[in-house]
């Protein structure tokens, strides 16, 4: 297999991969190259893929071990490691900045999205580099949050979670707000706005405004990247140092369907 080309998507982070067919076996050398590119760039876009669910799953296993997602109803029967993200069936758009599955003890190292059906316009996914997000905080804010712990649960008002989901994954999981990346050693701001139901030592009513204030400081145009989807795009996001959000400003009469895989991660420290 010829080496794919890896091209920057912006001056700060993000890269695209051209000339890679995920249906074909990938050499150890290229797997190493791609995994390093993810660490270096935070977000990778692999263009022009035409994959079955199993091919998608097998291709992404080169980056880590796929893990089952909550919302069991949306797992593909033919390949349960792949789930649907769709603007149907009571699934609300994830329009707020977040990092996935923080209600798990070992949240995913990466989220991978594959475009299957798209509206005629809109429906972008936006990404934020949270290494830089942490650096964007004022010195006083950074010092205040250095040792903060969030308490993470499933959103109580979400209609797409089943009783089985809640029994398995609604456990009040503790995570550090400033996370050290296990591979790069760099620190990043780390929380999920709607799953962080509490912060240790803070009154519950103060938590959401506090987190929203952090996002206002942390996320600026210079550390964000907007991905305009094309059918066949596979986008890999490093959950340990990035947040993402879906832009819901598109015609909801049109279906927007992404397939998602998440890869097993470490317990945040």
Image (cartoon, grey):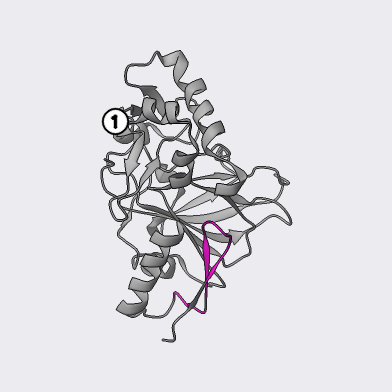
Relative to 160, residue 185 above or below: below
Q: Residue at x 40, y 38 (%)?
A: 190
Task: Give the x, y percent position of residue 216.
Answer: 56, 32
On-image quarter of the N terminus: bottom left
Which residue bears the numbered disc 1?
174
Q: Is residue 78 visible?
A: no
Q: Quadrant of residue 64?
A: bottom left
How many marks can you see?
Answer: 1
- Residue 151 visible here: yes
Asked if residue 135 is positioned above or below residue 172 in the image, the reply reads below
Dot 1: element: strand
Residue 66, percent from left and from top: 33, 57
Question: Which secondary structure type mostly characterizes the magenta part of the structure?
Answer: loop
Residue at 34% x, 49% y: name it.
186
Q: Does residue 10 belong to the magenta stretch?
A: yes
Q: Which residues are magenta?
A: 7-22
* Left or right of 225, for residue 204: left
Q: Residue at x 36, y 22 (%)?
A: 199
Above or below, 203 relative to 77: above
Q: Residues within 10 Å of mark 1 (few under 14, many from 20)?
A: many
Looking at the picture, does residue 23 appear above or below residue 169? below
């Amino acid at each position: 297999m010829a080496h794919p080309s890896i091209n920057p998507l912006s001056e700060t982070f993000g890269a695209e991969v051209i000339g890679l067919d995920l249906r074909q076996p990938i050499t150890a050398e290229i797997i190493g190259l791609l995994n390093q590119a993810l660490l270096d760039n935070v977000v990778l876009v692999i263009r022009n893929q035409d994959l079955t669910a199993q091919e998608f799953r097998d291709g992404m296993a080169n980056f880590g071990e796929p893990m089952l997602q909550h919302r069991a109803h949306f797992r593909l029967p033919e390949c349960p490691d792949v789930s649907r993200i769709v603007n149907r069936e009571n699934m609300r758009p994830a329009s707020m900045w977040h990092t996935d599955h923080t209600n798990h003890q070992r949240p995913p190292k990466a989220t991978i999205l594959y475009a299957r059906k798209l509206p005629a316009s809109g429906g972008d996914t936006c990404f934020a580099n949270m290494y830089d997000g942490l650096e964007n905080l004022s010195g006083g804010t950074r010092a205040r949050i250095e040792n903060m712990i969030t308490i993470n649960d499933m959103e109580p008002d979400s209609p797409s979670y089943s009783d089985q989901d809640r029994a398995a994954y609604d456990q009040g999981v503790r995570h550090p707000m400033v996370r050290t990346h296990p591979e790069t050693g760099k620190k990043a701001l780390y929380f999920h706005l709607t799953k962080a139901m509490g912060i240790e030592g803070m009154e519950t009513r103060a938590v959401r405004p506090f987190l929203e204030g952090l996002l206002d400081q942390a996320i600026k145009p210079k550390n964000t990247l907007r991905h305009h989807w094309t059918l066949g795009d596979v986008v890999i996001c490093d959950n340990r140092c990035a947040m993402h959000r879906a832009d819901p400003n598109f015609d909801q009469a049109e279906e927007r369907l992404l397939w998602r895989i998440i890869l097993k991660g470490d317990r945040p420290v």
